[in-house]
Image (spheres, grey):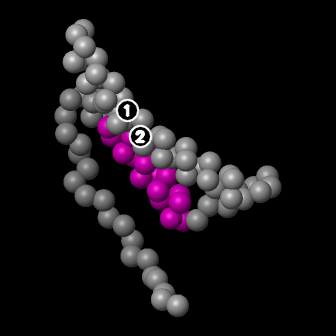
Amino acid sequence: MDMSSKSASTARIDRELAHLKILSRLLGHEMHAQSGQRILLSRDSVEEIQTSLDLFIESVHGGRAQTQSTVTSVETAPVASRIN
């Protein structure tokens, strides 16, 4: 394995691990922001966690199979907002 393929391999691993780093930071933030034994997560936080895990799984699976992702679109439910 030459140096260019090692750096490409390292860059690919870093890209795949980026999703898990985001998850870790989100969970760490919630643990820091909330004290006590139980932690409450908003629906948005859980959706972000699920999306990050799905992206990680697809990037790892796609890397092994050397095929493109089968997900064509991601639909999100509309969220009501209010302006104060």
Residue of label 1 = 14
Mark 1 to mark 2 CA distance (whole Å): 6 Å
Query: At x 24% / y 9%, what residue is drawn?
Result: 1
Looking at the image, residue 25 sits to the left or right of residue 79; the answer is right
Q: Look at the image and tell me whether residue 48 can be seen.
A: yes
Q: Chief secondary structure of the magenta span?
A: helix
* 82 in relation to 21, above or below: below
Residue 32: % across, % down: 69, 53
Residue found farthest to the bottom = 84
Query: At x 55% / y 52%, what residue is drawn?
Result: 26
Looking at the image, residue 41 sits to the left or right of residue 12; the answer is right
Residue of label 2 = 18
Q: Look at the image and tell me whether residue 57 can be seen.
A: no
Residue found farthest to the top = 1
Magenta span contains residue 56: yes
How packed mark 2 is, by other alpha carbons closer than 10 Å (few <14, some 14-19, many 20 or more), is: some
Residue 80: % across, % down: 45, 82
Query: At x 39% / y 76%, what residue is drawn?
Result: 78
Please state the extent of the stretch shown in magenta in the rendering. Answer: 43-59
Q: Which amino acid does label 2 sit on?
A: Ala
Residue 57: % across, % down: 38, 39
Residue 13: % across, % down: 36, 29
Query: At x 58% / y 65%, what residue is drawn?
Result: 42
* 12 in relation to 80, above or below: above
How packed mark 1 is, by other alpha carbons closer than 10 Å (few <14, some 14-19, many 20 or more), is: few
Q: Are marks 1 and 2 in contact (CB under 8 Å)?
A: yes
